[in-house]
């Protein structure tokens, strides 16, 4: 479903695509939510037009390898530019996305879809720029999100230490809060060394 929500953070109307699993309209069930964020040169459509996330999840659900869930595809490009991920300015853009997700996207989705609005039933993942946004937003909202995925992305030590030093200072508590932190990057990816260092 193609949707539009009002972004208080950005002061504009923004696009959003929402996948619902087979049987959603007929049932009264509530569902967990995955926020799946696109990469720098992509739009909110890329995960299903190119990545085929809808077909992949349909098949995983049919094979009972995944539970039925809602996938939310936000437009991750922020009108504040896309700073180099090696800079502290990247975190400023990540924070704009974080604020938009928490104050605009999540309330819209929870109001318009039958979600389970609990931290252990929410996940965020993304590719490239979207992976950085997902790491930042996930770490910043462990009271709202318990599952975090990153594909070909990382946070610099400077960004992590500035915003999330509490996570490394108390790893036992962090491990209790995060159900899963999953990172993937190919060895031929130009971001391989930065992602593995992170």
Image (cartoon, rainbow, N blue to C red):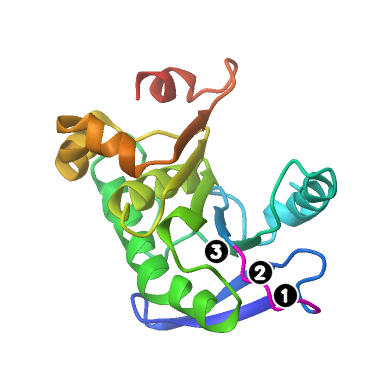
**Disc 3: CA contacts within 10 A as few (<14), some (14-19) or many (>=20):** many
Q: Which residue is mark 1?
A: 1
User: Distance from label 3 to label 1 (Cα)?
Assistant: 14 Å
Residue at the (21%, 41%) spot, across then down: 164
Which of the marked residues, 3 or 1, is nearer the chain's N terminus?
1
Q: Position of residue 31 (x, y in %)?
A: 62, 65
State whether residue 28 is above or below residue 94: below
For residue 28: magenta? Answer: yes
Question: Horizontal placement of 29 versus 182: left or right?
Answer: right
Residue at the (57%, 60%) spot, across then down: 32
For residue 23: magenta? Answer: no
> In the image, which residues are magenta?
26-31
Which of the marked residues, 3 or 2, is nearer the chain's N terminus?
2
Looking at the rendered image, the disc whose residue lies closer to the viewer, 3 or 1, is 1
Q: Which residue is mark 3?
A: 75
Callout 3 touching callout 1 (CB < 8 Å): no
Residue at the (74%, 46%) spot, across then down: 51
User: Distance from label 1 to label 2 (Cα)?
Assistant: 5 Å
Callout 1 touching callout 2 (CB < 8 Å): yes
Q: Position of residue 105 (x, y in %)?
A: 47, 72
Q: Which residue is mark 2?
A: 18
Instruction: State the SS at label 3.
Output: loop
Please name whichever residue, 142 or 15, is drawn nearer the observer in this view of the structure. Answer: 142
Task: Say the numbered circle drawn on residue 40.
Answer: none
Which of the marked residues, 1 or 2, is nearer the chain's N terminus?
1
Instruction: State the SS at label 2.
Output: strand
Looking at the rendered image, the disc whose residue lies closer to the viewer, 3 or 2, is 2
């Amino acid at each position: 479903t193609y949707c539009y929500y009002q972004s208080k953070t950005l002061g504009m109307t923004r696009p959003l695509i929402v996948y619902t699993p087979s049987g959603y309209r007929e049932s009264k069930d509530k569902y967990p939510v995955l926020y799946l964020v696109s990469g720098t040169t992509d739009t909110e459509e890329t995960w299903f037009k190119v990545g085929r996330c809808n077909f992949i999840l349909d098949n995983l659900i049919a094979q009972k390898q995944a539970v039925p869930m809602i996938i939310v595809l936000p437009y991750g490009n922020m009108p504040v530019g896309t700073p180099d991920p090696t800079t502290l300015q990247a975190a400023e853009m990540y924070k704009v996305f974080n604020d938009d997700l928490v104050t605009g996207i999540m309330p819209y989705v929870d109001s318009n879809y039958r979600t389970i609005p609990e931290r252990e039933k929410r996940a965020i993942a993304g590719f490239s720029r979207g992976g950085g946004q997902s790491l930042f937003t996930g770490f910043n909202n462990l009271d709202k999100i318990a599952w975090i995925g990153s594909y070909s992305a990382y946070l610099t030590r400077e960004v992590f230490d500035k915003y999330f030093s509490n996570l490394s200072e108390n790893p036992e508590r962090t491990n209790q809060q995060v159900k899963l932190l999953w990172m993937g990057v190919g060895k031929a990816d130009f971001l391989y060394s930065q992602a593995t260092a992170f």
